[in-house]
Image (cartoon, helix red, strand yellow):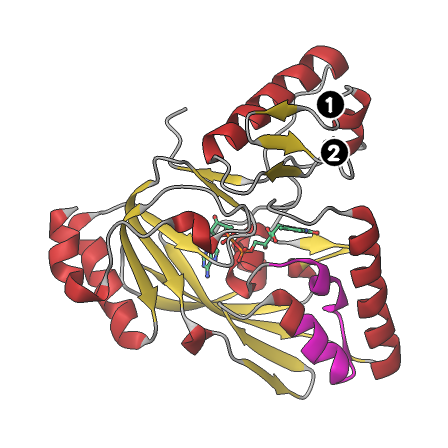
Amino acid sequence: MRDAAAILRERARSGVALGLFTTYRVGGPADLFLEIDGPADLDLACRAVAATGVPVLVIGRGSNLLIADAGFRGLAVKLGDAFAAVDVIGTDVRAGGAAALPVLARRTAAGALTGLEWAVGVPGSVGGAVRMNAGGHGSETRDTLRRVGLVDLGRGAETEIAGAELVLGYRRSSVTPDQVVLWAEFGLREGDREASEAEVAGIVRWRREHQPGGANAGSVFTNPSGDSAGRLIDAAGLKGHRVGSAVVSPKHANFFQADEDGSADDVRALIDEVRRLVEERMGVLLEPELRMIGFTR
Ligand SMILES: Cc1cc2nc3c(=O)[nH]c(=O)nc-3n(C[C@H](O)[C@H](O)[C@H](O)COP(=O)(O)OP(=O)(O)OC[C@H]3O[C@@H](n4cnc5c(N)ncnc54)[C@H](O)[C@@H]3O)c2cc1C
């Protein structure tokens, strides 16, 4: 770690609490944290990772991340505002990896482009959406994703790749932990501004009615084929189930919430317990959608 710190020097900070960058708002520090504000930082990160092999965690808007209370033993990187631009050329939209999905959804809807309305309900970044193949309301990232620009920090090479080559599936892709999505290009269709904006407003309304606020990271588990994780957790009698500072939302059983000043390890313990109880009571082993970082088991 000291080798990586020596290469990154004053650009990197140590002991930065990563929970602050996540929607759960819990979790400990990274050994090293670097905000990538431009090509020079990117180059520095590549040199540090290539020379030392330090483990990497790319943080987007932290809306699908649970970081252990013990933190992350490695280099956490986050793209800064320099990577948040959204450029519209005809029906093509190029968005930086740090651009917020709701901003992208509203901007394209206002420009009478259709195809990304669903993204208003997903509080992640474009990079996180590509990595997770985020989706909702019957659509997903891969439907409109054309090309992606990414850099492999271990290899240092920036490459451009067709969306179809990223093996995007249900909440997964072939993007590796060392790869940073710098931008993504979406191919949209000409639409009707009023209709798209009404769809966006409808999605926001639906989310408010059906999903809880507070500290959570959306769905904890993926839906098993032909069923829903929320239905199974509810049917197992676990709505409102609590472990320490973490609770299964009484509003949506696949959303687990952390109390203010809560603990990531409590959230993790709740996830393990719910998984075990759902298997025991419903005969289905749920698979986490949430990315859990820094836990020893
Ligand atoms: C209230 C709420 C509702 C949600 N609803 C949905 C939903 O309907 N559908 C859905 O799919 N998800 C949903 N989510 C989960 C989450 O918003 C998505 O998974 C989103 O795509 C994560 O993006 P992020 O930028 O927050 O990624 P993070 O949580 O920061 O990271 C998630 C993963 O992506 C990687 N990553 C992040 N940025 C980059 C990058 N630039 N390059 C490479 N890898 C990167 C991380 O290393 C990590 O593996 C919801 C979350 C919340 C809190």
Residue at 68% across, 88% down: 90
Q: Mark 1 highlights which residue?
A: 238
Does the beta carbon of the residue at mark 1 sit less than 8 Å from ligand 1? Answer: no
Query: Is the residue under label 1 in contact with that under label 2 (CB below 8 Å)?
Result: yes
Q: State the extent of the magenta-drawn residues as a range.
A: 104-123
Q: Is residue 137 visible?
A: no
Spot occupied by residue 198 in the image (x, y as percentages of width and height): 87, 72
**Local SS, label 2:** loop
Q: Residues within 10 Å of mark 2 (few under 14, many from 20)?
A: many
Spot occupied by residue 197 in the image (x, y as percentages of width and height): 82, 75
Q: Residues within 10 Å of mark 1 (few under 14, many from 20)?
A: many
Q: Main secondary structure of the magenta part?
A: helix
Identify whether 229 is placed above or below 28. above
Residue at 69% across, 54% down: 135
Hey, what amino acid is under mark 1? Leu
Q: Is residue 118 magenta?
A: yes
Label placed on residue 253? 2
Q: Is residue 281 left or right of residue 20?
A: right
**Quadrant assignment for the C terminus:** top left
Hey, what amino acid is under mark 2? Ala
* Residue in the foreground of this view, choosing between 119 and 183: 119
> For the residues marked 2 and 1, what is the alpha-carbon distance in whole angstroms?
7 Å
**Local SS, label 1:** loop
Identify whether 59 is placed above or below 188. above
Residue at 78% across, 39% down: 251
